[in-house]
Image (cartoon, rainbow, N blue to C red):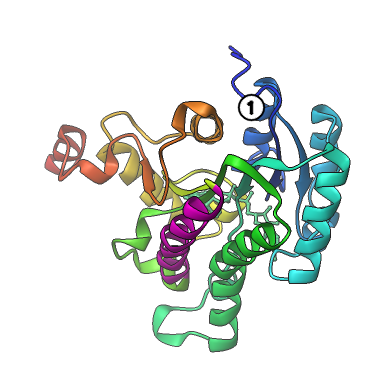
Amino acid sequence: MANNLLKGKKGIIFGALDENSIAWKTALKVKEEGGEFTLTNAPIAMRLGTINQLAKACNAEVIPADATSEADLTNLFTKSMEVLGGKLDFVLHSIGMSPNIRKGKQYGDMNYDWYLKTLDISALSFHKVLQTSEKLDAMNEWGSVVALSYIAAQRAYPDYTDMAQAKAMLESIARSYGQRYGSLKKVRVNTISQSPTKTTAGTGISGFDVFFDFADMMSPLGNATAEDCANYIAVMFSDYTRMVTMQNLMHDGGFSGSGITNALVERLSK
Ligand SMILES: NC(=O)c1ccc[n+]([C@@H]2O[C@H](COP(=O)([O-])OP(=O)(O)OC[C@H]3O[C@@H](n4cnc5c(N)ncnc54)[C@H](O)[C@@H]3O)[C@@H](O)[C@H]2O)c1
């Protein structure tokens, strides 16, 4: 059900690794809504993933960039404007990685070099994206920049370890940069806090299946899927949300507003 919501809009989509990725679903949705974009991911992820398949389906060019590298980001924004023939209207930052989680490290046994890498890849990269875009004057007025967050930024989850700090920082960057970019160029900056979702990044967290089911039972609408998230991102890129900025938007089927639900009471009463 397409509505041409993004007709004439141009942008960059970070983070489509495979068909489960939230960025992958978003690319398909944005295309369906009439948007044009370049796709990007870290060079190593491109070798492992299947981004070229998506590029073909979306008629999009792929421009590799490690989101922690200012040089790569400058090249990405410059080339994207060339390829798309003008300034951008939207950017999706859909990037997360923790070497500590990957290597199964407990929160009491963090490797601090990896901790810094987590913050650089999953949070600071968002500042680098915004700063690069501002320096190159790459966004049109009323442009929209979205990054993806998780409720572990506000509440403790034992196995989310250093990613919790990365998400808290990511949300803080959206507020601070949103204030700056809004007053300078009328560009909006928000984070969307998404339900647990079965992707490579999501399922890499130990105990994922349990907290996926728990969140589903705690959410009156159930967990939001990657497709639901893509729909919401399309709306956030559209002109219907022009006055929304500096927000962390809960996209979680009602999880964050629930104390307990009947589904959980019934389950725990057994
Ligand atoms: N899956 C979930 O449960 C869930 C819930 C809430 C928020 N999120 C967030 O959604 C976003 C997208 O994750 P996903 O679930 O689609 O998983 P995913 O694994 O498909 O996507 C993560 C992406 O980050 C990319 N990436 C890693 N290091 C990079 C670097 N240095 N430079 C550029 N890209 C790099 C990966 O290649 C991958 O494409 C992440 O920010 C994640 O934290 C996920």
Residue bearing the label numbered 1:
29
- Please name the residue shown 72% across and 43% down the image: 18
Q: Height in image: 129 above or below 81?
A: below
What's drawn in magenta, residue-wise?
Answer: 163-185
Q: Is residue 49 magenta?
A: no
- For badge 1, the amino acid type reads Lys
Question: Looking at the picture, how far across and down is residue 218, in whole percent?
Answer: 26, 40
Residue 183 belongs to the span the image colors magenta: yes
Image-quadrant location for residue 268: top left
Q: Main secondary structure of the magenta part?
A: helix
Residue beneath the point at 44% across and 49% down: 209
Query: Residue 1: x and y, percent?
Result: 58, 12
Above or below residue 218? Residue 161 is: below
x 38%, y 50%: residue: 210
Quadrant of the picture in which ligand 1 is shown: bottom right
Residue drawn at x 50%, y 35% is 236
Residue 132 falls left or right of residue 150:
right
Q: Is residue 103 visible?
A: no
Determine whether 25 is above or below 119 in the image: above
Position of 191 with respect to 257 (left or right) is right
**Image quadrant occupied by the C terminus:** top left
Image location of residue 102, percent across then percent down: 59, 69
Nearest the camera: 173 or 220?
173
Q: Nearer the viewer, residue 239 or 220?
A: 239
Q: Nearer the viewer, residue 10 or 126?
A: 10
Q: Quadrant of residue 223?
A: top left
Q: How many numbered markers are drawn? A: 1
Residue 205 position within the rendered picture, expressed as x and y whole percent measured from the top left: 50, 60
Q: What element carries label 1?
A: helix
Q: Can residue 1 be seen in this view?
A: yes
Quarter holding residue 253: top left
Residue found at the very far front of the displayed protein: 184
